Image (cartoon, grey):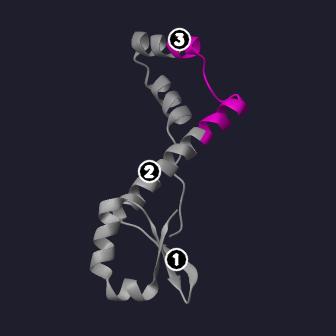
Amino acid sequence: MYRIIPSSDLRNKYTEISQDLKDNHQPVIISNKGESDIVAMSMDYFEEMELELEFYKSIAENYEDIAKGNYKTGEEVGNLLRRYIQNDSSELVAELKAKYTPKQEKRNV
């Protein structure tokens, strides 16, 4: 269960609350007029949560790829690597990059 503090505490005890958030890596709910309003957390904790979310997102994408048949078997990968080692083919490198390099999504901020 998350700790709930009134918005007046955030105004009056900012330094104490900030340090507590940094020390405990737990978000705090800020209430306004007795109602939950916003969530506050340390920047470090936020970044950890972002990394975790990206990790789970990549796992979900991998499962989607497998379901769609977008994968290579161990034997296929071995054959590609063998061709690469034998030929040092830039065409093969381009093929591998095109297939396995993640495409950058444009994000509006």
Against 109, residue 13 (above or below) is: below
Q: For mark 2, give the secondary structure.
A: helix
**How many numbered discs, if any?**
3
Q: For mark 1, give the secondary structure.
A: strand
Q: Which residues are magenta?
A: 60-78
Reading the image, the residue beneath label 2 is 51
Numbered badge on residue 10: none
Circle 1 packing at 10 Å, graded few (<14), some (14-19), many (20+), is: few
Kind of residue at disc 1: Ile
State which tag comes first along the sequence, 3 or 2: 2
Residue drawn 62% across and 26% down?
A: 71
**What is the distance, in whole Å, between disc 3 and disc 2 at their CAs?**
34 Å
Where residue 18 sits in the image (x, y, percent)?
31, 73
State which tag comes first along the sequence, 1 or 3: 1
**What is the distance, in whole Å, between disc 1 and disc 2 at their CAs?**
21 Å
Magenta segment's dominant SS is helix
Where residue 84 sits in the image (x, y, percent)?
44, 16
Residue drawn 51% across and 51% down?
A: 53
Numbered badge on residue 38: 1
State which tag comes first along the sequence, 1 or 2: 1
Kind of residue at disc 3: Asn
Callout in the foreground (1, 2): 1
Numbered badge on residue 79: 3
Residues 94 and 100: in front is: 100
Where residue 8 sits in the image (x, y, percent)?
42, 89
Residue 17 part of the magenta-drawn span: no
